[in-house]
Amino acid sequence: MIPAYYEFYNPVKINAGDGALETIPYELGQMNAAKPLIITDKGVVKNGLLEIVLNAFRDSEIVIGAVYDDTPPDSSLVVVNEITALYHKSGCDSIIALGGGSSIDTAKGVNIAVSEKTNDIATFMGADRLKSTPRPFVVIPTTAGTGSEVTLVAVINDTENHVKLPFTSYRLLPNLAVLDPRMTMTLPPKITAMTGMDALTHAVEAFTCMQKNPISDAYATVAISLISKNIMSATKPNAKKETRFAMANAATMAGVAFSNSMVGAVHAIGHACGAIARVPHGMAMSILLPHVMEFNMDKLEDLYAKLLLHLTDEETYAKTFQSQRAKKAIQRIVEMRKELYDIAGLPFTLRGAGVTEEQFAKIAELAMNDGAMLPNPKILTTADVIGILKKAY
Ligand SMILES: [Fe+2]
């Protein structure tokens, strides 16, 4: 059903495929930028990815102003300020994020600091608080999962006060996302599996949450098909470039989908598992997804039934009775998790992820206050969350 009113916005240009990196100098020139700052992390440098990116600028007039390669796994206000100082000292005029979710969120934080001329971006926390034109911003994802290259969200840790600061604004959307298959070729199997399941969760929740719309549905369903067909082969050692590229496309499409609808209870509970028990985000998504789907079943059976087509194939869908399709869709995700455990050792229980039962009450309390709970189509109580945690244990 098409909602009576909805909004959809995705102005991010996407350059994708072999050689996409080599288009960045031209694209920066089009944005009147000549001296970008690259924000990345040590792992990216170690895997030789920074070198590939730097080579793409070799014959261009663009000068790399500076490279910050020490982004931690969790972005922080301190790091944002450190990089902002480097940006100004080096006379940069644009930003390139090269990495996973943390580098991209950190770069969004730096863009806030630079464009709003502040050394305290916390004052801009929340929705639609940014008023200034952001600097030209290019994102090169090196994982296929977060979708941050096309989302209007950034989460920066305030490590002093132990809180995560959310920022939401159309001004955080990058100008350009570059999906070059060379960037995800070295991703280890377990990270490939985790980030892929995060992307799957983005797509499933975007397709089923309260703010879904026909355009986000289109992105979500294609993303689910691509992930379902490629996640296993992408996770195996020596995965082919085509499957890696398919996963990168899927993650971006899932990002567009949830940036224009929302996520739901899987993310709410998963965020809490991350905060209380340090469960990596994608791992939490993989563990919780089928259990939350089961919980939502009475409200979402028709939509889950539709997803069977995208999670399997036309033949399986046609051969399955309508009354069994939703169950089979969930079953398919359960099977995917078992395979990912066999291939990459990705845990499919909270126990396997290091969560203890004593942590359940705190996780549930935090999950109930998470913003992602609101668009979940079925209201959850604290007892419901504990019930889901027990099943996932
Ligand atoms: Fe996610």
Image (cartoon, rainbow, N blue to C red):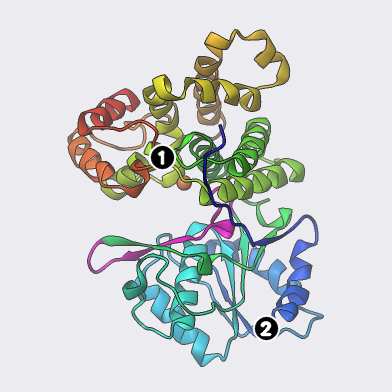
Residue drawn at (44%, 38%) of the image: 210
Residue drawn at (77%, 62%) of the image: 20
**Residue 293 percent location from the top left of the image:** 43, 26
Residue drawn at (43%, 60%) of the image: 73
Decide: marks 1, 2 in contact (CB < 8 A)?
no
Whether residue 252 is in magenta: the answer is no
The kind of secondary structure element at disc 1 is: loop
Q: Is residue 318 above or below residue 372?
A: above
Residues drawn in magenta:
143-162
Q: Which of marks 1 and 2 is in front?
A: 1
Identified by mark 1, the residue type is Gly
**Residue 286 percent location from the top left of the image:** 46, 34
- Depth check, front residue: 124 or 144: 124
Residue highlighted by disc 2: 33
Asked if residue 201 lies left or right of residue 265, the reply is: right
Determine whether the beta carbon of the residue marked 2 sits less than 8 angstroms from the nearest atom of ligand 1. no
**Residue 351 percent location from the top left of the image:** 32, 31
Q: Residue 17 carries which label?
A: none
Residue drawn at (59%, 23%) of the image: 306
